[in-house]
Image (spheres, rainbow, N blue to C red):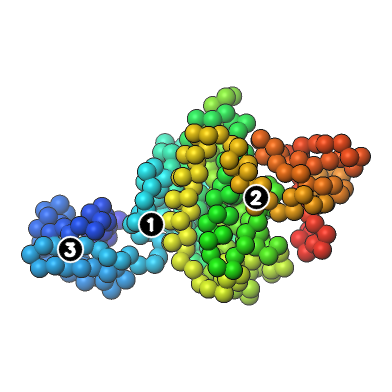
């Protein structure tokens, strides 16, 4: 980082930490070690970049509006969380936020660390699929968690994440989200978001869980890669509006923290109920594809550990952990 950048970052951080209160030019100059005139020049530069700054004579400066672009500072501004997102690692371009997340977690990155990128060149999906993550078009984010739960409960956190995403999207006009088992978010039967959970654990102890979230936000239909065009969608396509990715991330983090804290206090039951309230095709007949079979059966809901509760072809109740579900007017069959 060069001198100019680091001064600027320090300045933004000091102003951001001060929130709505003013901080004097003298205090800024003392903390950063540059002249008051240099502080004033830096403020003019920030304004050119979309920061709105109020300068009150003899009182000081404060930021009233951050630009709508992703950075650790813009994301932290107004992020009213207790532990989630206290460390935010933002990168303009990465291979995969999951790769950065694993590295950060191995190096001791704390519970609640966020890794976010404008663009991923090697975004990863479940089952070794790739995940298209074009610049500025979506939310490409990973969360490091170090929960005190048993490794065999980790899947519950993926289901929790799906409910949090659904809750956030449900608030947007003309968007009615559903969760396709186990954790794809559908709008109008097309996939808008996916979750990839990876874990490092020993016997009965989790070292960390890395929850990767990909949400299509501002793609037009033409922006969607042709191999997913018929089965994917974005918030912009569904709502007709371009949305702020920064705001969406902040809404997600606030909702995630509340839901995670509730889960640690009350366990999985409230999450299971919420998941089922968004569950796609619950109570209906679905097609189930496992590595060796394909059959139709009713979808009854999910179990305590997130398994798909359904029936065998002979009508015997079963719980499945690994399968794909489909439905019949399906455009989603691969
Ligand atoms: C899926 O297959 O549905 C899961 C997609 C998960 C994509 C997200 S984008 C952020 C994070 N980084 C990745 O490389 N993958 C996840």
Compared to residue 173, the image places residue 146 above or below, namely above
At numbered mark 2, what does the secondary structure look like: helix, strand or loop? helix
Q: Residue furthest top?
A: 203
What is the spatial separation of the Cα atoms under label 3 and label 2, in whole angstroms?
A: 47 Å
Neighbour tally class for label 1: few under 14, some 14-19, many 20 plus, Cα within 10 Å? many
Q: Position of residue 145 (x, y in %)?
A: 48, 39
Compared to residue 262, the image places residue 94 above or below, namely below
| Quarter of the figure with the N terminus | bottom left
Examine the rendering and report whether any part of residue 141 can be seen. Answer: yes
Q: Residue furthest left?
A: 58
Which residue shows up at 49% across the image and 68% down it?
A: 243
**Mark 3, residue position:** 61
Mark 2 or mark 1: whose residue is earlier in sequence = 1
Q: Residue furthest right?
A: 314
Q: Position of residue 214 (x, y in %)?
A: 56, 56
In the picture provided, is 108 more to the left or to the right than 275? left
User: Looking at the image, do the residues carrying marks 3 and 2 touch, with CB atoms under 8 Å apart?
Assistant: no
Res 75 label: 1
Compared to residue 152, the image places residue 292 above or below, namely below
Q: Position of residue 68 (x, y in %)?
A: 39, 67
90 or 107: nearer the viewer? 90
Closer mark to the observer between disc 2 and disc 1: 2
Which residue shows up at 63% across the image and 41% down it?
A: 272
**Mark 2, residue position:** 277
């Amino acid at each position: 980082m060069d001198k100019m950048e680091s001064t600027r970052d320090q300045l933004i951080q000091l102003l951001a930490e001060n929130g709505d209160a003013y901080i004097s030019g003298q205090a800024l100059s003392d903390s950063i070690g540059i002249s008051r005139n240099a502080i004033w020049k830096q403020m003019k530069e920030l304004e050119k970049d979309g920061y709105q700054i109020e300068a009150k004579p003899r009182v000081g400066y404060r930021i009233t509006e951050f630009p709508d672009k992703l950075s650790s500072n813009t994301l932290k501004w107004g992020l009213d969380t207790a532990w989630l997102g206290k460390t935010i690692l933002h990168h303009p371009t990465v291979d995969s936020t999951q790769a950065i997340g694993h590295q950060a977690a191995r190096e001791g990155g704390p519970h609640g660390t966020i890794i976010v990128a404008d663009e991923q060149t090697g975004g990863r999906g479940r089952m070794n699929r790739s995940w298209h993550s074009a610049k500025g078009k979506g939310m490409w984010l990973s969360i490091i968690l170090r929960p005190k739960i048993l490794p065999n409960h980790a899947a519950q956190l993926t289901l929790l994440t799906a409910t949090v995403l659904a809750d956030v999207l449900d608030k947007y006009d003309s968007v009615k989200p559903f969760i396709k088992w186990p954790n794809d978010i559908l709008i109008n039967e097309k996939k808008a978001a996916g979750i990839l959970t990876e874990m490092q654990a020993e016997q009965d102890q989790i070292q960390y869980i890395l929850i990767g979230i990909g949400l299509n936000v501002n793609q037009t239909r033409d922006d969607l890669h042709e191999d997913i065009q018929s089965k994917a969608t974005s918030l912009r396509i569904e709502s007709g509006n371009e949305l702020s990715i920064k705001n969406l991330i902040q809404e997600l983090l606030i909702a995630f923290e509340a839901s995670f804290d509730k889960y640690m206090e009350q366990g999985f039951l409230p999450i299971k109920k919420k998941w089922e309230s968004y569950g796609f095709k619950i109570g209906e007949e679905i097609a189930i594809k496992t590595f060796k079979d394909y059959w139709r059966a009713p979808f009854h809901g999910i179990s305590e550990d997130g398994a798909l509760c359904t029936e065998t072809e002979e009508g015997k109740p079963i719980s499945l952990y690994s399968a794909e579900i489909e439905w019949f007017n399906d455009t989603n069959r691969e």
